[in-house]
Image: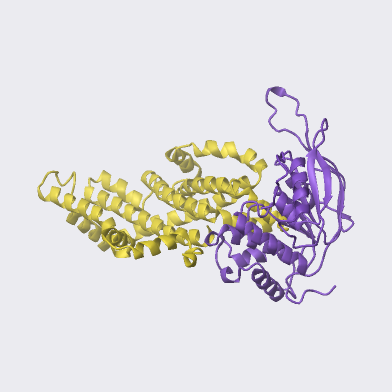
């Protein structure tokens, strides 16, 4: 595949299929005081979905429903799950170098400069000069070239989150896993970051799994939206709804069709739509 | 204002202070200059020296109780001329440095394994805790029986003294390394030694150095304990010998020398600590 002309090194077009096959996860309660038997608590069950290469899928759900757990399972950070997760046809067993993770917090190393932090994401064994060139381009891409030599404490939260995104992109991941990466940002910065993500994805359509609790964000960014939720009378969350978002990106934030979908998804999250006067933003 | 948003809070505060006029700024500047700091910190020692001189001029105490500063100075000159003071200081400094080096290295090693792996914490934790509770002087008879009155017994005692501050601070610091940062390191493919050198070690550098500072101070304490009881040279020996001969001037000289050397070595490590905090934290 031809790489983008604006980013010859930084992002190449690798995109892998991610397949979840009967994935479940339960946790055993650790505080078993007074000899109570530790009943495993089922968080996720029966997750079945195939994410196509280059697809951008948003995972929506109420807090504590297991969206982050699903993402961590995909990254290989959580190995205690049941069922099968495959990336590009091969199962995920432990930390997987084909995927890259951007956390809700920037999680930059305070003793490293922004450049050094981004460089940490580079694939192992990459040529030094090539690595430097890629980091420089990624910093350019996320607009941090001027702050390349600053320490994380010297930059704003939005800048730190961009550095975190650049670090994940440095891996040249076939699957980009984003755990509410814009959740802690102010509203305006969040919108800019969403546009940045779309730019990156347009330039190099890697597969993206985006965990969010923001319905608008999901509708603005995703090809498909997974709604994680509980079925009445069943333990644990599973895919309660799978919505294909209509229209190409960037999408009109005021579209009536999206507004209807938004109200529908919010209902799925347990938010009353009140009247029919729903509007985006 | 937008120009300052990327600056550190401290830099902003400095800029603000510079813009404001008035006396408060001038006072702040005085304490922020080297000369001003030195001047303020030398007020108390000079006052003590003057009070000492005054009490001996007025004859409040007998010479046996409190000799004048001049007599202490002359006692020092006398010892130098006899060729005793240099070797005494030399042997004491040597014992402190060797004991400190041994104790601190062992402390680093055991602190690291106990802090990193719970199994070693369970294995060593309580035993080391119990050994730590033994007062320094309680070791002396045993060390003398085992190692005789040689250098080994003194260096062992100092090493015991230097071990615990390093061991406890390193173990605690490693146990409390930000779990999110460690996970971020793991997510980018780091594990084992690489994870340790890239994430955990840099994260604990400032605490390790403050542990080393404590250990050095402790080494001087243990040095005197060792030399007071069994030695034929060194500052501790000078203390004991002078007490037996009723040479209060030499006792005070030894105390002042211990204070000066303890403070000097601590200040050197303090500079190192300052640099390390700027570099790593």
Tell me where residue B54 appears, x and y as whole percent.
Answer: 13, 50
Q: Residue at x 48, y 37 (%)?
A: B134
User: Quick one: which residue is furthest to the top in this view?
Assistant: A34
Vertically, is A65 above or below A118? above
- The reply, left or right, for residue B47 in relation to residue A140 is left
Vertically, is B173 above or below B88? above
- The reply, left or right, for residue B276 in relation to residue B78 is right
For the image, the number of numbered tags is 0
Query: Chain B colour?
Result: yellow
From the rendered image, report the letter of the chain displayed in purple.
A
Tell me where residue B204 appears, x and y as whole percent.
Answer: 56, 53
Residue A1 sits in which quadrant? Answer: bottom right
Tell me where residue B98 appears, x and y as whole percent.
Answer: 48, 56
* Res A123 visible: no
- The reply, left or right, for residue A41 in relation to residue B231 is right
Tell me where residue A245 appears, x and y as whole percent.
Answer: 81, 54
Q: Residue at x 41, y 60 (%)?
A: B13
A141 or A37, nearer to the observer = A141
- The reply, left or right, for residue B154 in relation to residue B53 is right
Residue A164 sits in which quadrant? Answer: bottom right
B80 or A48, nearer to the observer = A48
Vertically, is B55 above or below A3? above
* Res A271 visible: yes
B89 or A14, nearer to the observer = A14
B91 or A207, nearer to the observer = A207
Q: Is the image coloured rainbow, by chain, by secondary structure, or in one colour?
A: by chain
């Amino acid at each position: 595949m031809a790489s983008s002309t604006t980013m010859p090194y930084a992002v190449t077009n690798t995109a892998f299929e991610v397949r979840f096959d009967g994935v479940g996860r339960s946790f055993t309660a650790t505080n078993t005081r007074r000899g109570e038997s530790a009943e495993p608590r089922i968080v996720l069950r029966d997750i079945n979905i195939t994410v196509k290469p280059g697809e951008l899928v948003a995972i929506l759900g109420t807090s504590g429903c297991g969206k982050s757990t699903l993402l961590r399972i995909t990254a290989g950070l959580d190995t205690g799950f049941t069922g099968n997760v495959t990336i590009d046809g091969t199962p995920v067993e432990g930390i997987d170098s084909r995927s890259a993770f951007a956390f809700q917090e920037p999680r930059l190393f305070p003793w490293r400069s922004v450049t050094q932090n981004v460089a940490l994401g580079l694939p192992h064994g990459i040529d030094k000069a090539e690595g430097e060139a890629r980091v420089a381009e990624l910093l350019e891409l996320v607009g941090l070239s001027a702050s390349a030599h600053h320490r994380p404490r010297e930059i704003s939260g939005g800048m730190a989150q961009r550095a975190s995104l650049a670090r994940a992109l440095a891996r040249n991941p076939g699957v980009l896993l984003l755990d509410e990466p814009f959740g802690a940002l102010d509203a305006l910065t969040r919108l800019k970051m969403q546009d940045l993500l779309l730019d990156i994805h347009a330039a190099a359509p890697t597969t993206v799994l985006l965990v969010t609790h923001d319905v608008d964000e999901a509708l603005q960014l995703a090809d498909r939206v997974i709604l994680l939720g509980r079925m009445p009378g069943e333990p644990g969350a599973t895919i309660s709804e799978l919505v294909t978002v209509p229209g190409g990106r960037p999408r009109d934030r005021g579209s009536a069709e999206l507004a209807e979908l938004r109200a529908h998804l919010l209902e799925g999250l347990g938010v009353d739509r009140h009247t029919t006067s729903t509007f985006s933003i | 204002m937008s120009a300052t948003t990327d600056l550190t809070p401290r830099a902003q505060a400095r800029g603000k202070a510079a813009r404001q006029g008035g006396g408060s700024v001038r006072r702040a500047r005085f304490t922020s200059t080297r000369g001003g700091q030195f001047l303020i910190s030398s007020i108390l020692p000079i006052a003590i020296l003057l009070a000492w001189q005054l009490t001996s001029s007025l004859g409040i105490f007998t010479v046996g109780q409190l000799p004048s500063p001049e007599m202490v100075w002359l006692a020092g000159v006398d010892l130098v001329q006899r060729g005793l003071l240099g070797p005494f200081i030399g042997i004491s400094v040597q014992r402190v440095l060797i004991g400190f080096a041994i104790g601190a290295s062992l402390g680093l090693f055991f602190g690291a394994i106990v802090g990193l792996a719970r199994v070693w914490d369970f294995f060593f934790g309580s035993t080391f805790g119990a050994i730590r509770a033994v007062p320094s002087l309680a070791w002396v008879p045993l060390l003398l029986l085992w190692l005789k009155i040689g250098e080994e017994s003194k260096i062992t005692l100092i090493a015991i003294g230097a071990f615990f501050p390093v061991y406890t601070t390193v173990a605690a610091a490693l146990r409390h390394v930000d779990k999110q940062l460690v996970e971020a390191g793991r997510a980018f493919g780091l594990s084992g030694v690489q994870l340790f050198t890239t994430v955990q070690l840099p994260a604990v550098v400032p605490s390790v150095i403050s542990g080393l500072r404590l250990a050095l101070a402790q080494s001087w304490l243990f040095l005197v304990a060792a030399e007071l009881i069994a030695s034929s040279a060194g500052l501790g020996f000078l203390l004991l010998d002078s007490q037996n001969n009723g040479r209060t001037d030499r006792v005070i000289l030894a105390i002042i020398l211990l204070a000066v050397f303890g403070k000097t070595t601590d200040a050197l490590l303090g500079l190192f600590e300052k640099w390390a905090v700027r570099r790593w934290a």
